[in-house]
Image (tube, rainbow, N blue to C red):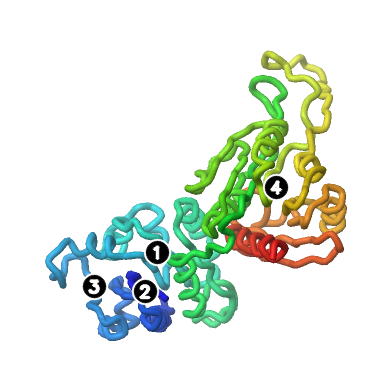
Amino acid sequence: MLSGFTVVVGVTGGIAAYKTLEVISRLRKLGAETRVVMTENATKLVAPITFQTISNNPVVVHMFEEPKQWNVEHIALAEAADLFLVCPATANVIGKIYNGIADDFLTTSIMACTAPILICPAMNHNMYMNPVVQRNLAGLRELGYHILEPDSGRLASGAVGKGRLPDPERIVREIVAILLPQQDLEGLRILITAGPTREWIDPVRYISNPSAGKMGYALAAAAVRRGAAVYLVSGPVALEAPPGIVLKKVETAQEMLDACLEFYPESDVVIGAAAPGDFQPETVAGQKMKKSGGMLRLALRETPDILKTLGKDKGRRILVGFAAETENVVENAIKKVIHKNLDFVCANRVGVPGRGFGSDTNAISIVMPDGSLEEIGPAPKYEIAMAILDKVKSIIG
């Protein structure tokens, strides 16, 4: 399956380093060429000769040791990689990679690598949940690094929590998915909305919400990876659009509806992951409104309902909505799926730490018109996106 691919494996000084031996063994059984780089701390846990035997290639540890071949070895190794795996990835190396520190052979090779990089964190639960580590992981995701979430369970310290290195089988499965991505949505045209809208009060003020667009952008990235043609209609967000999509940027809910209507006739699937504003000012002041020392009353009217409008002319399309609720989550989602003529709604409760607006993770309930539901997460939004696309695929058949 992986014949012709080279996987460079970076091993750091985590207690789970021994599990990487099985990862390499499984990769070789699939036909991959494997090359190993170890940090000095990793060599105190597992001898380099062990990795050399399993990989059938010399192991590199020190930056200035005699090169095995006549070349600039860290550059040559980075260029040879079809995928660079860091397994296990300690908090130390994660911080180095995110902050651009290249002070040993492993981090220097990663800095020179243009292939996909898969990072498998493994550490103590409290260390993994530390906001600094979570910030570094979130930043690496935004830069395009692949992060495989650790498992929960009993750790080396005896504590129970999240931080275990995933099973080698799961790691290899993720490598295969990156090197041989699914193309099961090839031929489908998917319209996705993302981010908030802004409804202007005057030239310097607007009504909006905290949506950062991460769920919609994760859906776009996942759909492209699986072979779909993607139209992304995005409100104002600070995210870089995935390569290979058609991007249309908008500000107001009306602009978002107009853009959706532009792409709608040629779309097979619509996923409304945006959080368009429900209300807009009755009038927009032409100049900045000044304080007068009294009360200001702002008259609001409803914005156009994008999914309801599209649902009136649904045809054979698949329509998927999102429902961010503060109470009666499932009940409100069922009303929305029927009222707007949707195939299903992804409902989530806002205000829960680690979920919803601005978060890198989410947990949703996929609610069907008959009231049946499927719980997904908590998980990174990219994994949630994959699960949503799996549901779309199952409906299409």
Left or right of residue 229, residue 390 in this image? right
Q: Are marks 4 and 3 in contact (CB under 8 Å)?
A: no
What is the CA distance from the residue labelled 4 to the residue labelled 1?
39 Å
Q: Nearer the viewer, residue 341 or 377?
A: 341
Q: Quadrant of residue 39?
A: bottom left
Left or right? Give the position of 119 relative to 55: right
Q: Secondary structure at mark 3?
A: strand
Give the CA separation, mark 3 to mark 2: 15 Å
- Reading the image, the residue beneath label 4 is 272
Residue labelled with disc 3: 60
Q: Which residue corresponds to mark 2?
A: 13
Circle 4: residue type: Gly
Q: Which residue is mark 1?
A: 92
Mark 1 and mark 2: span between their CA atoms?
9 Å
Identify the residue shown where x is 58% and y is 55%.
187
Q: Position of residue 119 (x, y in %)?
A: 44, 65
Q: Is residue 64 left or right of residue 390?
A: left
Observer-nearest residue: 265 or 340? Answer: 265
Q: How many marks?
A: 4
- The answer to whether one can see residue 10 in this image is no
